[in-house]
């Protein structure tokens, strides 16, 4: 993975936080970063594409706690 790839992932996760207007925290960031890497590995290569899937699959901060153990099913 290159620096530009990491920048894409970082920006996608940041867009999730901005969309839901929440302050980043360690637990959510860990989950979102893991999900973003999985999406990247599945072929998603744009900030918008990854952010959209994150926003659709993790609907607000409350899902960070309920999906923490089941997030491996992102498609």
Image: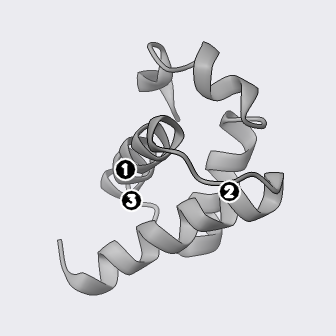
Q: Which mark is residue 43?
A: 3
Determine the residue positioned at 77% across, 35% down: 59
Q: Nearer the viewer, residue 25 or 72?
A: 25
The CA span between labels 2 and 3 is 19 Å
For residue 58, what is the image quadrant?
top right
The residue that disc 1 covers is 42
Who's the residue at 53% across and 74% down the image? Answer: 11
In screen coordinates, is 24 left or right of 61?
A: left
Q: Earlier in the sequence, mark 2 or mark 3?
A: 2
Proximity of marks 1 and 2: CB atoms separated by less than 8 Å: no
Q: Nearer the viewer, mark 1 or mark 2?
A: 2
| Left or right position of 49 against 36 | right
> Label 2: how many residues lie within 10 Å, few (<14), some (14-19) or many (20+)?
many
Comparing 45 with 6, the one in front is: 6
The residue wearing badge 2 is 16
x, y percentage for residue 38?
A: 36, 45
- How far from the left and from the top, in percent, is residue 30? 40, 41
- SS for dot 2: helix
Lower position in the chain sequence, tag 1 or tag 2: 2
Spatial CA span between label 1 and label 3: 4 Å
């Amino acid at each position: 993975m290159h620096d530009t790839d990491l920048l894409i992932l970082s920006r996608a996760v940041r867009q999730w936080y901005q969309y839901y207007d929440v302050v980043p925290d360690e637990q959510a960031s860990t989950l979102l970063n893991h999900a973003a890497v999985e999406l990247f590995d599945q072929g998603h290569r744009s900030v918008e594409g990854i952010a959209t899937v994150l926003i659709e699959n993790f609907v607000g901060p409350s899902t960070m706690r309920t999906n923490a153990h089941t997030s491996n099913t992102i498609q």
